[in-house]
Image (cartoon, grey):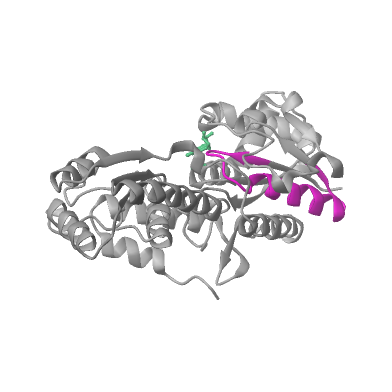
């Protein structure tokens, strides 16, 4: 009987619970034993009670819970070989050699490293007498499958990450609330949204709510005079009769010198325009709440696909990441997706924004 472990790792995202539910139930349906690893990689490193065999009923109700019920963590130990060695030990002693990780690019990078090291980890466990050759023999290959759980939508080779549309929905709703009060008092609001180095949430929220101006990391103002552009656009809109001003600032927004553009700076410019201006940093409400229907569906379909991938991969196949491209659930090589995600970040860091955009826009559908 195939034994599969599922875990959530890194920043939590709405839809992680439905993903776990889908893996547990698809796994059981297809004749596997499914274990939940609690607290991200900490559960793998620690083992014991943090590795729990799941039954059908254990994930009841998970579709409508936000966050992740099996916990997540940033685990420093797993970044060290000794931590990964303990992870391998705990998996093998439970007879597990397939791991489905739902997390962001950090978590998936860790997962990929774990798989690359797996044979040498097993050798070390035998050499140091922690496991016997016969205990290890049936588990010589580790199957890793990645599910991308992140509100930032910052992973290459997939159109949407699990949680991104829920966060977008929440942000849009909040901006609507803010707009109502802004309009009443004829005020300006600077709304700071999450996204780390990716401007997807900021850009999409700006489009969804009709913001006056949007600052994102991928398109810094071209000539350094963003203050003038901002004033020009906002006063033009006011002149047309708009009673509110809304500026969205993504948390990674930068100017053409790669210096952060902060909400305080933006506010200063709006005040100079004579606008009564407030800053709202949306913060963690963006991650909270239940997943929107799109994320429930995405995580359910991808969770099932992850289990199918575990069952039909051969040791020669590269570890897949489950994505969605042009509305189809697809498998793409995890290593390549992680590498491409890093190339996009590197291009942004070296100011090559056109390269970053074209890398991101590459069409990976077959
Ligand atoms: P996210 O998955 O949301 O990008 P992090 O980057 O914090 O979040 O990664 C989550 C966890 O994955 C880390 O706390 C660590 O345990 C593990 N991890 C991340 N990068 C690596 C790496 N290069 N090697 C080993 N483990 C890693």
Instruction: Please provide percent x and percent y for residue 94.
Output: 79, 34
| Left or right: where 231 falls relative to 82 | left
Q: Where the C terminus falls, by quadrant?
A: bottom right
Q: Nearer the viewer, residue 239 or 123?
A: 239
Side of 281 where 63 appears, left or right: right
- Observer-nearest residue: 312 or 279? 279
Residue under the image location 28 percent in, 46 percent down: 187
State left or right for residue 337 relative to residue 240. right
Residue 299 in the image: x percent, y percent?
Answer: 66, 55
Residue 339 sits in which quadrant? bottom left
Magenta segment boundaries in residue numbering: 7-34
Residue 24 sits inside the magenta stretch? yes
Q: How far across and down, in percent of the image, does residue 67 sit?
A: 62, 39
Q: Is residue 262 visible?
A: no
> Compared to 281, does 291 lie above or below?
below
Residue farthest to the front, as pictured: 184
x 63%, y 49%: residue: 15
Does the magenta portion include 141? no
């Amino acid at each position: 009987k195939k034994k599969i472990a599922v875990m959530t790792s890194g920043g939590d995202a709405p839809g992680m619970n439905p993903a776990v539910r889908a893996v547990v139930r698809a796994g059981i349906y297809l004749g596997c034993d499914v274990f939940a690893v609690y607290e991200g990689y900490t559960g793998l490193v620690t083992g014991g009670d943090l590795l729990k065999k799941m039954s059908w009923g254990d994930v009841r109700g998970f579709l409508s819970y936000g966050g992740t019920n099996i916990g997540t963590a940033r685990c420093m130990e797993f970044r060290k070989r000794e931590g990964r060695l303990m992870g391998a030990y705990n998996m093998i002693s439970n007879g597990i050699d397939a791991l489905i990780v739902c997390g962001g690019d950090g978590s998936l990078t860790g997962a990929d490293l774990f798989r690359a090291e797996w044979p040498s980890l097993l050798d070390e466990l035998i050499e140091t007498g922690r496991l016997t050759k016969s205990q290890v023999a049936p588990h010589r290959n580790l199957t890793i499958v990645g599910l991308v759980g992140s509100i930032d939508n910052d992973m290459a080779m997939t159109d949407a990450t699990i949680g991104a549309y829920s966060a977008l929905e929440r942000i849009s709703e909040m901006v609507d609330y803010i707009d109502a009060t802004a309009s009443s008092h004829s005020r300006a609001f600077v709304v700071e949204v999450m996204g780390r180095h990716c401007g997807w949430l900021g850009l999409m929220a700006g489009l969804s709510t009709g913001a006056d101006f949007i600052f994102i990391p991928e398109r810094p103002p071209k000539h350094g005079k963003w203050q003038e552009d901002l004033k020009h656009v906002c006063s033009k809109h006011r002149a047309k009769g708009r009673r509110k001003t809304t500026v969205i600032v993504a948390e990674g927004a930068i100017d053409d010198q790669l210096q952060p553009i902060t909400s305080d700076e933006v506010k200063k410019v709006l005040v100079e325009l004579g606008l009564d201006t407030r800053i709202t940093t949306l913060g963690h409400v963006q991650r909270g709440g239940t997943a929107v229907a799109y994320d429930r569906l995405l995580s359910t379909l991808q969770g099932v696909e992850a289990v199918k991938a575990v069952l039909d991969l051969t040791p020669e196949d590269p570890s897949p990441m489950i994505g969605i491209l042009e509305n189809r659930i697809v498998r793409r090589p995890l290593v390549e997706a992680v590498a491409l995600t890093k190339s996009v970040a590197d291009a942004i860091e070296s100011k090559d924004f056109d390269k970053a955009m074209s890398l991101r826009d590459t069409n990976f559908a077959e």
